[in-house]
């Protein structure tokens, strides 16, 4: 069994989740590399009842017409609550990945349908890709988002057929060979295969979320379709949408595309070099030989030497969601979402900050999703990240049971040590572990050992020092360029 170091455990928790505190990291070290990955990936075996109880007490989604209990702000508060408090971080991280992959916006679909889609992505996140792709293609939010409901025989709408290939499965060109994956004629033919795809809500069903998918036969094109002509995977016949999804899911181009997407979200950006193409082929083999299993594919990635290599360490820029949730989980900060917006006893700070930093959950900018890594960073958003660091450390609520987000005095004490050297080391380890140079460490120690005017005072681990200096040091560390990386 391959062992795993503390740094590797922290790396794994940042990528398969949003980071963990030292206790979380220590918990997985004894499991070894494969055991730790299996523990995180088989999340359905992990007891998550504490989160379930919190969600029941904090949210009421029984009636989506009951404004303001069911609106986008409440949905964002619900998802951030899940990400902060879950004991199944990889469940939420995979849901976030698919939310960006199948980017769909509530601005067009409405809040009820986007919530339904989120549940679908979470439930099927590690399925055979064929099944996930089918579920998303039949999802009411997607049918509205890409105008599938207007796709009828004799007047096909090509929006979904195009994005199905360009963004959701293969890409315009094969990411390894560079060959075109489809033609405009394929788009037209595939659009006809999906005609008549609709959804409805049973008239007398009391469950407001019981939308059902149907193929409306009078609107479905039952004539012959020819797709991918001249290729070895060419097919013709009275093809329906299910047939197209099966054909696309079995193509190696799809395996390659998914591997690249997963690597650039979870491992490191790829540059199209021969080495990267070989890596894509290596993991595409897993997809092709393991019945297109997403679970088997991501497991192979997370236990690989590529994932633990130097190239992967701190190679990604944290998204707003990752930097917000990650800081809370790593520092052991408290987030109490409250009860409900209606009662005026809720807190939606993480979602508000995420929007401030450029990522509004349930509202990606377009069908291509958010631009990852360097796309998150510019002069404005970097300053906004520093503002979040400031907000997290300065908030000191009088009522510790009130809704809100804060770093408690007791937690500050647990994060500090008896002298400045050990305190700096502890905090750098907690927030990464972050590797900084000796001059920076010396500057951090000097900060802890001086007053507000810079006069040397020594380090005394008392309440005043914890409340001012240790809080201030956490803020400084969260502003490091190293902390912006995942």
Image (tube, grey):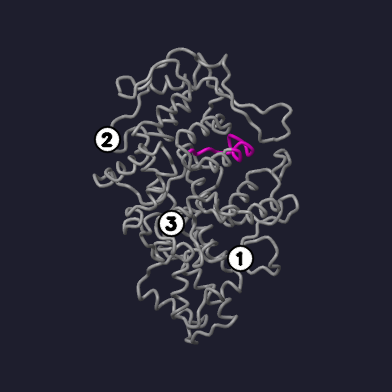
Circle 2 SS class: loop
- Which part of the image, by quadrant, shows the N terminus? bottom left
Q: Residues within 10 Å of mark 1 (few under 14, many from 20)?
A: many
> What mark, if any, has residue 392 been given in the picture?
none
Task: Name the side, left or right, on which 472 lies relative to 314.
Answer: right
Residue at point 64% right, 38% down? 112
The single residue placed furthest to the left in the displayed view is: 274
On the image, numbered disc 3 is attached to which residue?
Answer: 35
Q: Secondary structure at mark 3?
A: helix
> Crowding near pointer 3: few (<14 within 10 Å), some, many (20+)?
some
Residue drawn at the location 44% of the way across and 76% of the way down: 444
Q: Looking at the picture, how far across and down is residue 115, in whole percent?
A: 61, 41
- Residue 54 in the image: above or below residue 279: below
Badge 2 local density, few (<14 within 10 Å), some, or many (20+)?
A: few
Alpha carbon distance from label 1 to label 2: 50 Å
The reply to whether discs 2 and 3 touch (Cβ–Cβ < 8 Å) is no
Secondary structure under tag 1 reads strand
Instruction: Give the quadrant of the C terminus.
Output: bottom left
Task: Depth check: give the residue in front, 229 or 450.
Answer: 229
In the figure, is residue 463 to the left or right of 34? right
Residue 47 percent coordinates (x, y): 59, 54
Q: Nearer the viewer, residue 217 or 291?
A: 291
Q: Is residue 68 above or below residue 11?
A: above
Determine which of the numbered discs, if any, sits on residue 177 in the image. 2
Q: Which residue is mark 1?
A: 406
- Magenta segment boundaries in residue numbering: 102-116
The residue under the point 55% across, 46% down is: 361
Q: Is residue 171 left or right of residue 202?
A: left
Tell which residue pokes out farthest to the bottom in this image.
457
Reply above or below: 284 against 57: above
């Amino acid at each position: 069994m391959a062992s795993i170091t503390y740094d590797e455990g922290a790396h794994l928790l940042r990528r398969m989740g949003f980071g963990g505190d030292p206790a979380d990291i220590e918990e997985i070290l004894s499991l070894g590399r494969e055991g730790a990955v299996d523990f995180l990936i088989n999340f359905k075996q992990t007891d998550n009842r504490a989160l379930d109880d919190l969600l029941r007490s904090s949210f009421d989604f029984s009636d989506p017409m009951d404004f303001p209990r069911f609106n986008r702000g409440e949905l964002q508060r619900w998802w951030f609550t899940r990400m902060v408090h879950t004991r199944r971080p990889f469940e939420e991280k995979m849901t976030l990945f698919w939310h960006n992959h199948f980017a769909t916006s509530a601005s067009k679909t409405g809040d009820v349908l986007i919530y339904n889609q989120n549940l679908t992505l979470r439930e099927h996140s590690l399925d055979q890709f064929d099944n996930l792709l089918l579920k998303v293609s039949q999802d009411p939010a997607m049918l509205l988002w890409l105008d599938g409901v207007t796709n009828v025989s004799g007047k096909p709408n090509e929006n979904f057929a195009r994005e199905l290939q360009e963004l959701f499965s293969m890409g315009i060109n094969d990411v390894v060979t560079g060959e075109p994956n489809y033609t405009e004629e394929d788009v037209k033919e595939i659009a006809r295969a999906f005609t008549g795809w609709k959804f409805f809500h049973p008239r007398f069903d009391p469950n407001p979320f019981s939308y059902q998918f149907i193929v409306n036969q009078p609107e479905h094109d039952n004539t012959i379709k020819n797709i991918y002509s001249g290729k070895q995977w060419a097919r013709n016949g009275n093809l329906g949408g299910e047939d197209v999804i099966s054909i696309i899911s079995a193509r190696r181009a799809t395996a390659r595309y998914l591997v690249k997407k997963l690597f650039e979200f979870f491992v490191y950006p790829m540059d199209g070099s021969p080495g990267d193409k070989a890596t894509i082929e290596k993991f595409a083999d897993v997809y092709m030989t393991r019945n297109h299993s997403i679970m088997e594919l991501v497991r192979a990635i997370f236990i690989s030497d590529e994932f633990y290599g130097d190239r992967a360490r701190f190679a990604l820029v944290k998204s707003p969601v990752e930097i917000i949730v990650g800081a809370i989980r790593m520092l052991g900060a408290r987030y109490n979402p409250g009860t409900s917006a209606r009662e005026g006893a809720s807190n939606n700070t993480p979602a508000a900050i995420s929007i401030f930093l450029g990522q509004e959950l349930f509202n990606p900018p377009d069908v291509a999703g958010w631009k990852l890594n360097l796309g998150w960073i510019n002069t404005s958003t970097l300053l906004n990240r520093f503002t979040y660091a400031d907000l997290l450390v300065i908030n000191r609520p009088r009522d510790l049971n009130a809704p809100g987000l804060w770093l408690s005095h007791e937690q500050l004490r647990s994060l500090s040590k008896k002298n400045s050297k050990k305190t700096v080391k502890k905090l750098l380890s907690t927030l990464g572990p972050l590797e900084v140079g000796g001059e920076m460490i010396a500057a951090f120690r000097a900060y802890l050992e001086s007053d507000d005017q810079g006069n040397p005072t020594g380090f005394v681990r008392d309440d005043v020092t914890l409340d001012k200096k240790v809080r201030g040091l956490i803020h400084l560390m969260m502003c490091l360029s190293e902390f912006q990386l995942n």
